[in-house]
Image (cartoon, grey):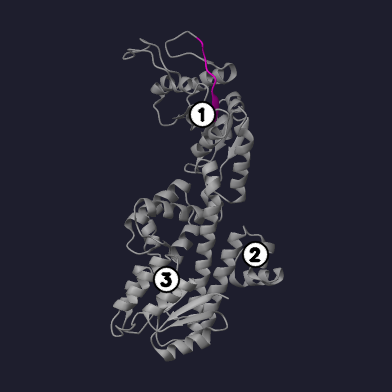
Amino acid sequence: MEKLLVIEDNEDIRKQLKWGLAREYEVLPAQDGTEGISLFRKHRPRVVTLDLGLPPDEEGTDEGFRCLEEILRTDPAAKVIVVTGNDERESALRAVRTGAYDFYRKPIDIIELKVVIGRAFHIRAIEDENRRLQAAVEEKTTQFGGIVGQCPRMEQVFATIRKVATSDVPVFVTGDSGTGKELVARAIHAQSLRKGQPFIPINCGAIPENLLESELFGYEKGAFTGAHTRVQGKVEYAHTGTLFLDEIGELPANLQVKLLRFLQEKVIQRVGGREDITVDARVVSATNVEIEKAIREGRFREDLYYRIAVITIPLPPLRERGSDIMLLANLFLRRFGEGLNRKVKGFSPAAIDRIRTYEWPGNVRELENRVQRAVIMADAAFLEPADLGFDESVSPVVPATEKRMTLKEARDRVERDLIAQVLQEQEGNIVKASDALGVSRPTLYDLMKKHGIGG
């Protein structure tokens, strides 16, 4: 049974909460801040209800805020629900900005408060699971050069990397901009027999066409105006290592011919030179264009395609990676929070909803950028949609006491959110989801139909 710490100086309210919540939780009552902090350190409950007006400052909030800050210092993940009087709204909002999970106004409706407490435990469980997943991927993140993922499609990517890394076959990585194509290329190199040798990347779409040939193949002294000395190109620098040709779909037709010759014969000629130079380099290529369409339209040579794409690794867009989205969001939050020394604890329910439902056209790169911006700009402990740069007209989830709902509405909301969350965690697997929820499959189907949740 979950432990729930109740810090309340009013004995009648303490008894009311202990009696009303005893069936669901092991209630730990405390009459002041000192006792509350002591019980918290001893039992480490995941959720706490806290009255701000505690002795010796019953008419003020200093002791309540001291208690709140000490609890969050001990366990930043703790969900603290501040219980306040009707005239203490500003103090309650200040508590939320300090890091409290929510606030609830007296007089207490025990049934309504149960909904707030239940949701706090639910969200804490989700956060704990996210932290567990983050710990589980640390080893894999190191192994695959910073690539993070747990969804089935990313597991396929990892499996392919393992298989092809130790061979020298050319690999072709496809995917939208921002999906991590260069990270895949680096992971292949890091696990290959060439890992101690150079990894040389070049973006074929970022260099002007008149400069790209000399960047790739180098040039001889006097090859053109300004060529005062011999210069090696990227291909030569990759000798014994790996050459990564990013955005190869943008490669001009004349350079496609020269690259094809290198792939076939392992020799190149510098611009302005006649000497064949042997180069032993593995080639990994990538593009975000539809290469088959480019071939049909005559913009990309079919024979070159078959040379570079012995093995193809397609990277899924972020919107198709399910629970990986929040996994990555929390990873970036922790990384930037620590790096920038900002005390940001997590995402609000509204922010989590926006992160999960947003299309992410810029993929992982956009998610990383938005989280970094949010960590810098946020004023509160939990990031809101506006901090992430989303439309501020879309309101975050308001505390339960801001706008009272009926008991049926509250139950339906918790039920709907829980079912949707578990289905996402189980990648839509009905059998696993029904088992996790403790209901039969027919019951789960009925509940999904009731709430309009697609299977």
- First in sequence: mark 2 vs mark 3: 3
Count residues near mark 2 (Cα–Cα under 10 Å), then give few for <14, some for 14-19, many for 20+: many
CA distance for labels 3 and 1: 49 Å
- Residue at position x 29%, y 77% in the image: 62
Q: Nearer the viewer, mark 3 or mark 1?
A: 1
Q: Residue furthest bottom?
A: 12
Q: Which callout, 2 or 1, points to the residue nearer the camera?
A: 1
Residue at 43% from the left image edge and 88% from the top image edge: 13
Write down the quadrant of residue 193 in the picture. top right
Q: Is residue 103 visible?
A: no
Q: Nearer the viewer, residue 55 or 431?
A: 55
Q: Quadrant of residue 71?
A: bottom left
Q: Which mark is residue 196?
A: 1
**Residue on which disc 2 sits:** 433
Label 3 or label 1, whichever comes before in sequence order: 3
Residue segment shown in magenta: 276-284
Quarter holding the C terminus is bottom right
**Placement of 112 over or under 251, stated as above or below:** below
Q: Tag 3, which secondary structure? A: loop
The N terminus sits in image quarter: bottom right
For mark 1, give the secondary structure: loop
- Rendered position, 352 above or below 179: below
Q: Please name which of the two marks, 2 or 3, marks the residue nearer to the observer.
A: 3
Sequence-wise, the earlier of marks 2 and 1 is 1
Disc 3 residue type (three-letter): Tyr
Q: Which residue is mark 3?
A: 101
Alpha carbon of mark 2 to alpha carbon of mark 3: how far? 27 Å
In the rendering, at what x and y percent does residue 23 appear? 57, 83
Q: Amino acid at mark 1?
A: Gly
